[in-house]
């Protein structure tokens, strides 16, 4: 009921309705830069960009499609058993799903000119959204989450695109442990929130900061 409003007998889509269900976000001035941007880099820096995609669909109808495009381009390893050959993703699919959903849900829509973004490097994945976190990043694991966009969060949860309230970061950490990955990192920027998933690395190659997070 918050996706549309009726004025003088005419139905108008709201910004919330558009960000969730629009067929083309470019048709909405305030939302044209809010599509999910995914960049696949070659190497560990940003100087050598590869493939890129910017979503134009509303989040509710474009989320699964965007994740499919992303996951198809992430690294994997091959495991061969006695009966079959299987491709095992380097990064946990459930953790990526949760991080991307969180970036969409918790972004600050008042920040103009920036969009939620996923950047894939050879050694990590960075997921960034506009808007500094509302709580200390060190409390993400044990603090009840606070969202700027409760109605959007409710719809995304109802569609089963993310975990129930309060369990998302726990699931991300748990999935990284199951895949023997370093602990994820959460970083507060001046006007952004960033989460980083790291590719597998040996203990001797981990920094002291990595070991503290673990």
Image (cartoon, rainbow, N blue to C red):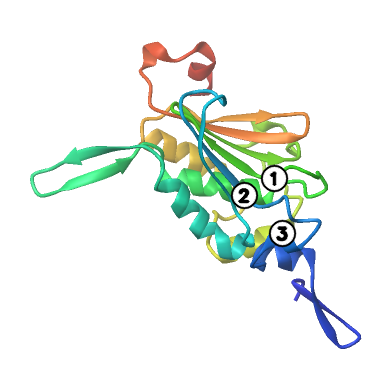
Q: Are marks 2 and 1 in contact (CB under 8 Å)?
A: yes
| Separation (CA) of disc 2 from disc 1 | 6 Å
The image quadrant of residue 113 is top right
Q: Nearer the viewer, residue 76 or 113?
A: 113
Q: Earlier in the sequence, mark 3 or mark 1?
A: 3
How many C-alpha atoms fall within 10 Å of the one at disc 2: few (<14), some, or many (≥20)? many
**At x 62% / y 61%, what residue is drawn?**
57
Q: Where is mark 1, residue-wise?
A: 115
Foreground disc of the pair 3, 1: 3
Q: Which mark is residue 158?
A: none
How many C-alpha atoms fall within 10 Å of the one at disc 3: few (<14), some, or many (≥20)? some
Q: Nearer the viewer, residue 204 or 89?
A: 89
Considering every residue shown, the one lying at the far right of the view is: 8
Q: Can see residue 169?
A: yes
How many C-alpha atoms fall within 10 Å of the one at disc 1: few (<14), some, or many (≥20)? many
The quadrant in which the N terminus is found is: bottom right
**At x 70% / y 60%, what residue is drawn?**
25
Q: Where is mark 3, residue-wise?
A: 26
> Taking 24 as reference, is 139 above or below it?
above
**At x 20% / y 39%, what residue is drawn?**
79
Q: Nearer the viewer, residue 88 or 160?
A: 88
The image quadrant of residue 133 is top right
Q: Are marks 3 and 2 in contact (CB under 8 Å)?
A: no
> Taking 112 as reference, is 180 above or below it?
above
Q: Where is mark 2, residue-wise?
A: 36
* Residue 3: image location, x then y, percent: 74, 72
**At x 67% / y 67%, what residue is drawn?**
22
Foreground disc of the pair 3, 2: 3
Q: Secondary structure at mark 3?
A: helix
* Residue 175: image location, x then y, percent: 42, 40
Answer left or right for 26 relative to 119. Answer: right
């Amino acid at each position: 009921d918050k996706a549309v409003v009726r004025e003088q007998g005419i139905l108008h889509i709201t910004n919330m309705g558009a960000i969730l269900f629009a067929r083309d976000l470019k048709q909405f001035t305030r939302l044209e830069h809010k599509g999910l941007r995914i960049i696949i880099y070659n190497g560990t820096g940003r100087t050598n960009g590869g493939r890129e995609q910017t979503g134009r669909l509303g989040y509710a109808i474009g989320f699964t499609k965007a994740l499919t495009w992303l996951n198809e381009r992430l690294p994997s390893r091959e495991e061969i058993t006695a009966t079959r050959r299987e491709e095992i993703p380097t990064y946990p699919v459930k953790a990526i799903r949760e991080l991307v959903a969180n970036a969409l849900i918790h972004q600050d829509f008042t920040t103009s000119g920036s969009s939620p973004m996923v950047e894939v490097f050879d050694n990590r994945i960075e997921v960034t959204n506009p808007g500094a976190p509302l709580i200390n990043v060190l409390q993400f694991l044990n603090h009840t989450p606070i969202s700027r966009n409760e109605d959007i969060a409710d719809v995304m949860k109802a569609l089963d695109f993310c975990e129930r309230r309060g369990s998302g970061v726990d699931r991300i950490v748990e999935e990284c442990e199951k895949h023997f990955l370093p602990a994820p990192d959460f970083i507060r920027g001046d006007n952004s929130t960033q989460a980083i998933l790291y590719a597998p690395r040996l203990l001797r190659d981990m920094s002291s900061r990595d070991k503290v997070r673990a």
